[in-house]
C-alpha cells in the first residue's frame, strides 16, 4: 500500500468513492474537473479528498500535457505584456506551453476557471495579482498541481510560494530622490489600498519622509487604481490645491501618464513646475516627453523566476525559499528636477 512521506497510509480513489457513496469514475470526473457531476456530489467528494489529504501522484513524463496556466487579474497594458513575455521565455526554454486566462479585474478565479484548469491538468499555475480561496488551493494541491503567486495581491497564506519585488524599497528610493532635489511637499498616488504592493510603496514613501524629519501629510496620500484615469483624477485634485505638491510619486508609470496630462491641462510644466516619478519602467517610459524618472521593477525576471519555481516544484523539488522579492532600482531621466524656488 502506498504511503506518504510521514508514513501515513495514502487513501485510494476507490476508498474515496466508497466514503462518498459514489463510483470510482465519478471521483475521477471530480479530480479531472469534469462538469457532468452534480454540485452536491462534487462538494461531498471534495470534502472527503480534503479530509483525507488526498494527493494525486504525478510528475513530468506522466502523460499530461506540457502546459502551465497563467492567470491574470487584468490584461490591458504594457505591464502585463512584460510579465507574459517573461513567462513565455522561461517556459519555452523547457518546451512548455502557456495557457493565458484573464479574470476581468477580479483578484480570485471563478470556479469554472479552476474546473478548466483541473481538466487540462497542467504542470502548474501562475497567478498574477490574484489568489485562491482555501477550497481552490486544496483542489490544486489534491491533484498535485503546484501554483506560484506573482506580485501578490494580499498577504498570502503560509506555505504559498510567491515572487515579487521590494516594493517598500521602491517607495523609499523614489521619495529619497525627490527629497535630494529639495522637494518637501511630495504627494503619492499609489494603487488600490487593499493591494499589498500599493501599501508597501506608500510605507516606503512615509519612511523616507520620516527619515528626513518631515511629517507625512495624509491629504497628500492618494489611493488610485494603477491606471491612467486614476493618475489624472488625483493629479488634478492635488495640483489644484493652494498648497500644491512640487513633486508627485505615482505608483505606476500608467498613473504618471494621467498626472502628466493633468499638469498640461493646468498650464504647468514637468519638471519646471512639478517633478514626477513613476513605477515599473515599462518600455514607453523612456520615450515620453519628458522621459520618465521611474522605479524599475524587474517584471520579466519576476515572471521568469516564478515560472522556474513552479516547474521545479512540478518535477518534485522543494524550493528553499517560498518568498522571493527581487531588487528595485531608480532610473533617473528628465521628469525630475530641483524644487522650484518660492513655491
Image (cartoon, rainbow, N blue to C red):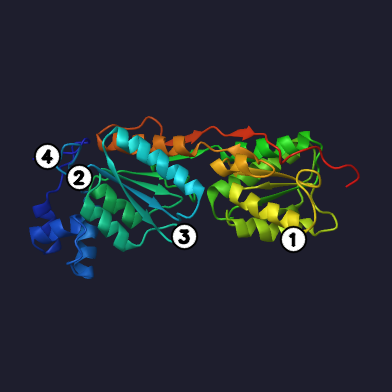
Q: Nearer the viewer, residue 137 or 114?
A: 114
Q: Residue at x 80, y 44 (%)?
A: 272
**Element carrying mark 3:** loop
Q: Position of residue 157 (x, y in %)?
A: 42, 47
- Marks 3 & 4, CB-CB < 8 Å contact: no
Q: Residue at x 37, y 29 (%)?
A: 320
> How far apart are the alpha carbons under marks 1 and 2?
52 Å
Does label 3 or label 1 sit earlier along the sequence?
3
List the residue tagged with mark 3.
Answer: 105
> How far apart are the alpha carbons under marks 3 and 1?
26 Å
List the residue tagged with mark 4.
Answer: 2
Left or right: 42, with 245 as reference point: left
Q: Residue at x 73, y 39 (%)?
A: 336
List the residue tagged with mark 1.
Answer: 237
> How far apart are the alpha carbons under marks 2 and 4?
25 Å
Q: Which mark lies nearer to you, 3 or 4?
A: 3
Q: Nearer the viewer, residue 231 or 171?
A: 231
**Element carrying mark 4:** loop
| Quadrant that contains the N terminus | top left
> How far apart are the alpha carbons under marks 3 and 4?
43 Å
Does label 1 or label 4 sit earlier along the sequence?
4
> How far apart are the alpha carbons under marks 1 and 4?
65 Å
Q: Residue at x 24, y 34 (%)?
A: 315
Whether residue 107 appears in this view of the structure is yes
Q: Quadrant of residue 158?
A: top left
Left or right: 28, with 271 as reference point: left
Left or right: 70, with 207 as reference point: left
Does label 1 or label 2 sit earlier along the sequence?
2
Q: Residue furthest top?
A: 320
**Element carrying mark 2:** loop
Amino acid at each position: 500500500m502506498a504511503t506518504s512521506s510521514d508514513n501515513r497510509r495514502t487513501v485510494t480513489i476507490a476508498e474515496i468513492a466508497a466514503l462518498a457513496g459514489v463510483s470510482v469514475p465519478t471521483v475521477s470526473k471530480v479530480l479531472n474537473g469534469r462538469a457532468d457531476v452534480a454540485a452536491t456530489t462534487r462538494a461531498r467528494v471534495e470534502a472527503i479528498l480534503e479530509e483525507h489529504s488526498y494527493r494525486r501522484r504525478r510528475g513530468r513524463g506522466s502523460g499530461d500535457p506540457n502546459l502551465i496556466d497563467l492567470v491574470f487579474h487584468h490584461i490591458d497594458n504594457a505591464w502585463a505584456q512584460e510579465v507574459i513575455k517573461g513567462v513565455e521565455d522561461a517556459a519555452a526554454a523547457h518546451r512548455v506551453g502557456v495557457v493565458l486566462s484573464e479574470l476581468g479585474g477580479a483578484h480570485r478565479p471563478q470556479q469554472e476557471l479552476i474546473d478548466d484548469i483541473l481538466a487540462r491538468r497542467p504542470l502548474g499555475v501562475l497567478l498574477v495579482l490574484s489568489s485562491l480561496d482555501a477550497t481552490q488551493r486544496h483542489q490544486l494541491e489534491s491533484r498535485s498541481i503546484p501554483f506560484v503567486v506573482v506580485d501578490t495581491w494580499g498577504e498570502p497564506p503560509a506555505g504559498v510560494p510567491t515572487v515579487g519585488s521590494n516594493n517598500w524599497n521602491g517607495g523609499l528610493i523614489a521619495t529619497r530622490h525627490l527629497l535630494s532635489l529639495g522637494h518637501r511637499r511630495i504627494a503619492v498616488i499609489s494603487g488600490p489600498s487593499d493591494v499589498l504592493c500599493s501599501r508597501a510603496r506608500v510605507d516606503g514613501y512615509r519612511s523616507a519622509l520620516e527619515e528626513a524629519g518631515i511629517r507625512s501629510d495624509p491629504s497628500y496620500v492618494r489611493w488610485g487604481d494603477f491606471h491612467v484615469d486614476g493618475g489624472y483624477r488625483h493629479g488634478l485634485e492635488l495640483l489644484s490645491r493652494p498648497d500644491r505638491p512640487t513633486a508627485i510619486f505615482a505608483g505606476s508609470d500608467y498613473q504618471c501618464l494621467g498626472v502628466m496630462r493633468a499638469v498640461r491641462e493646468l498650464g504647468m510644466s514637468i519638471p519646471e513646475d512639478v517633478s514626477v516619478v513613476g513605477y515599473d519602467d515599462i518600455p514607453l517610459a523612456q520615450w515620453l516627453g519628458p522621459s520618465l524618472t521611474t522605479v524599475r521593477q524587474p517584471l520579466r525576471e519576476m515572471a521568469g523566476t516564478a515560472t522556474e519555481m513552479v516547474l521545479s516544484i512540478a518535477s518534485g523539488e522543494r524550493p528553499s525559499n517560498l518568498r522571493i522579492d527581487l531588487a528595485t532600482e531608480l532610473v533617473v531621466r528628465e521628469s525630475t528636477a530641483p524644487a522650484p524656488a518660492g513655491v
